[in-house]
Amino acid sequence: MYQNLRILPAVIMIPLFVSACQTSSGTKTADTDYTRIDSIAVFNETVVGKKLEYKTDHVVTISPNGTWRGDWGGDVIHGGWKWVDGAFCRTINTGKSEDCQQFELSNNRDSLRVIRNRGSGMRFNYRILN
């Protein structure tokens, strides 16, 4: 019985190694349910022009002209955006400074995980409505 316990770490590490070696059109994240969007072409195809819902009363749309707009719990919010070094960098009309966000697309392509501060900040999810 104790001999089997010695191989347990190897059995656990093999699937982790295999998943780390996979390739895709984006960069795989530690959570294999999502793939990082790391090019403007993929961002334009999967995010721009879509309605993105955070909770039921928070919806935003990112436009191809470098602006975005939304209804955030009854308040209209808007701002500008640009793609910088693999991140969605946006300003907001509330006077807050620019925030560059990492976007990750779910494998079933129905939701986005967003990580603020270039992937090191708070995480939240949008549901893609269209």
Image (cartoon, helix red, strand yellow):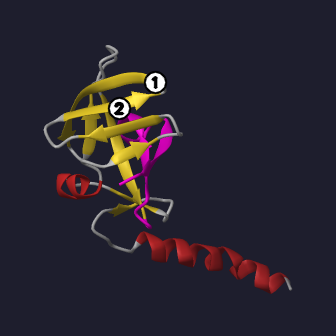
Question: In the image, which disc is placed on residue 29?
Answer: none
Q: Give the range drawn in magenta.
A: 107-130
- Asked if residue 125 lies left or right of residue 92, the reply is right
- Location of residue 30 with respect to 18 vertically, above or below: above
- Between the residue at mark 1 and the residue at mark 2, the CA separation in whole angstroms equals 9 Å
Label 1: which secondary element: loop
Residue 64 location in percent, x, y?
A: 16, 43
The structure residue drawn at horizontal position 49% and vertical position 27%, both measured from the top left corner, is 73
Q: In which quarter of the image is residue 115?
A: top left
Q: Can residue 121 be seen in this view?
A: no
The structure residue drawn at horizontal position 43% and vertical position 39%, both measured from the top left corner, is 120
Q: How many labels does the image show?
A: 2
Residue 95 location in percent, x, y?
A: 31, 13
- Location of residue 81 with respect to 1 vertically, above or below: above
- Location of residue 68 with respect to 86 vertically, above or below: above
Question: In the image, which disc is placed on residue 70?
Answer: 2
Q: Do the residues labelled 1 and 2 touch (CB within 8 Å)?
A: no
Neighbour tally class for label 2: few under 14, some 14-19, many 20 plus, Cα within 10 Å: many
Q: Can residue 117 be seen in this view?
A: yes
The structure residue drawn at horizontal position 16% and vertical position 36%, both measured from the top left corner, is 66
Q: Residue furthest left?
A: 65
Neighbour tally class for label 1: few under 14, some 14-19, many 20 plus, Cα within 10 Å: few
Whether residue 78 appears in magenta in the rendering, the answer is no
Whether residue 128 appears in magenta in the rendering, the answer is yes
Is 17 or 41 nearer to us in this picture? 41
Q: Which quarter shows the C terminus?
A: bottom left
Is 107 or 5 nearer to us in this picture? 107
Label 2: which secondary element: strand
Which residue type carries mark 1?
Gly
Which residue type carries mark 2?
Gly
Q: Name the residue under label 1.
A: 74
